[in-house]
Amino acid sequence: MTLLHFAIAVGVVALLTWAVCKLRRRFSQGGGFWDYVKNLTWRDYYARELARKREAIESPPLDDETIYHLVEKLLEVKDRDYVKQRLSAQKERALPSLLQALADPRYHRAKMTDDYREETPLERILDLIRPFAPHEAAQSLVPLIQRDRPDCHRKAAAAVLGAIGSDECIAPIQGVLKGSDDSVQHYAMNGIAEAVKEGRASPAFREAMFDAIVPLVSRRNMTASETAPRILLLLNKEKAVALLLDDRFFTPANQELHHILWALKCSEVPVPTAKLLNLIKGLREVADKYPGSYAYGYALLLLARTSSCEAERIIRESLTMPYEKVRECATQALCILNGLPADPTEVVWKQLKALGVSGLTEPQRILYHVSILKSEVENGGLAQYFVNSSGEQAREALAALKVINAVRSAEALAKAITLFGGQGPSRDHRERHHQMASLGLRQEEVWEPLNRAFCDPDDPLNLRIMLYAISHAADFRQTNAH
């Protein structure tokens, strides 16, 4: 498999994921994916749609009048996805017409159905505007975040206002963050993150947003409390570290502690060793269930980055704890202690991008096959793996699972392969799809028991992947990728 083949495979996976959502709209009884598996005409239809999407993305620059008429087509149900793709390909050239539409009440209608996947014309416009965060849109956006507006519009508008990051956005975003609408706050904070990363956030905006987000850190069981620590670290890292390590938040009693620890880990913040060891001691008592298991696991990842002489002992002891999340994080922590990334497959993808499959070492090739299989199964089950182009490598993936001693996953994949008859699954994509369609109408009953066996929590595949990488550490250190 060449790098080109891999890129095509990734594209097909993305297409299939998109196809599943589209199919479910058409089948009121659900199960759209299985209709795709059983009926090859759907496969041909979405292959044509993918070609059409590529055509839209690669379309040449359009004149202003054509762009204006394309924006008008967002009001229609037919072909709105294709129209949005064509407008997206025009980048900043589409902004004048999009801003004009933003002020046009025709685009402000609510959803026509109860389907959460439905996008209104205004949502599409805001999604197209968001990457450019034009300051001139700010005044038009403020009315859209008011409580009398549909939630879908409030979220999309809050995200764009946050992404603009100018002084005039301070008051409206403060109003959102002081409110009680968790999902709107989440969108606003994601927009704020974009403004900071793109260098658009003014100093006054950054300071005001920091103060407005602090109360959300300790809000119980809400999306906002998950997002808040990460955004605080982006806005003012020094100030945020002092806040998040304060005893008010950095305690096993804090039910939102796992979000803080994850943000500190992702921002590579060094936590004082004594403070961390004391926290881990307290977390052991609550590591048997969520969120304590997540907090304990993330604390192990932070501990692995310290110089503590106790780190390896604590991490290895945690490998035997009967909690899946703790064992997963302990294995990642052990990777870090051995000079590997927490996810060793990162090195595989970097090497793959640089040199292609032929440039991978044998241990890297083993994890390459396993990680593609794992990703497909987690996304849509073994059926998705086989119906996609990735399934042509099923025999290599089975051999790789055996090499890393992933016994349960290997048994499940081996049983899946037997469903295709004595010759096994064809390496030809279309023929393999024919084989799957021939399994009959009760596809879910065939595949679901195998999916459960593949993901057996008593023999987690993640653990096997990381232990294998540790035993071949020289192949998975960051410096090995070119």
Image: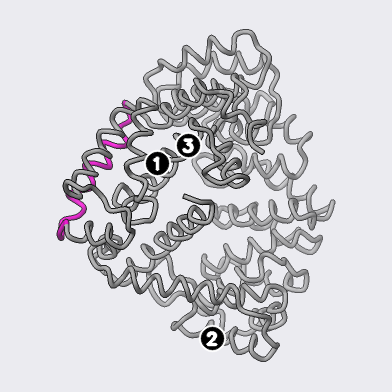
Determine the residue located farthest toward the right in the rendered image: 203
Q: Which of marks 1 and 3 is nearer the N terminus?
A: 3
450 in the magenta segment: yes
Q: Name the residue under label 2.
A: 73
Q: How far apart are marks 2 and 1 (CA)?
A: 40 Å
- Most prominent secondary structure in the magenta stretch? helix
Q: Residue at x 53, y 77 (%)?
A: 121
Calculate the distance from the C-alpha at mark 3 to the C-alpha at mark 2: 47 Å
Q: Residue 54: x percent and y percent? A: 53, 72
Q: Which amino acid does label 3 sit on?
A: Arg
**Position of the C terminus by quadrant:** top right
The residue type indicated by label 1 comes to Lys
Q: How crowded is mark 3: few (under 14 residues within 10 Å), some or many (20 or more)?
A: some
Quadrant of res 336: top right
SS for tag 3?
Answer: helix
Residue 133's place in the image compared with 289, above or below, is below
Residue in front for this viewpoint, 85 or 430: 430
User: Is residue 172 inside the magenta stretch?
Assistant: no
Give the labeled residue for mark 3. 365
Counting residues from the N terminus, which is met first, the one under dot 2 or under dot 1?
A: 2
In 3D space, how far apart are the residues under numbered discs 1 and 3 (Cα atoms)? Answer: 14 Å
The amino acid pointed to by label 2 is: Lys
Disc nearest the viewer among 2 and 1:
1
Q: Measured from the top left, where is residue 105 in percent x and y?
A: 59, 84
Q: How crowded is mark 2: few (under 14 residues within 10 Å), some or many (20 or more)?
A: some
| Between discs 3 and 2, the one toward the N terminus | 2
* 193 to 345, vertically: above or below: below
Specify the segment rendered in magenta. Answer: 439-458
Q: Name the residue under label 1.
A: 374
Q: Which residue is drawn at 52% across and 22% down?
A: 470
Front position in the image: 150 or 478: 478
Q: What element carries label 1?
A: helix
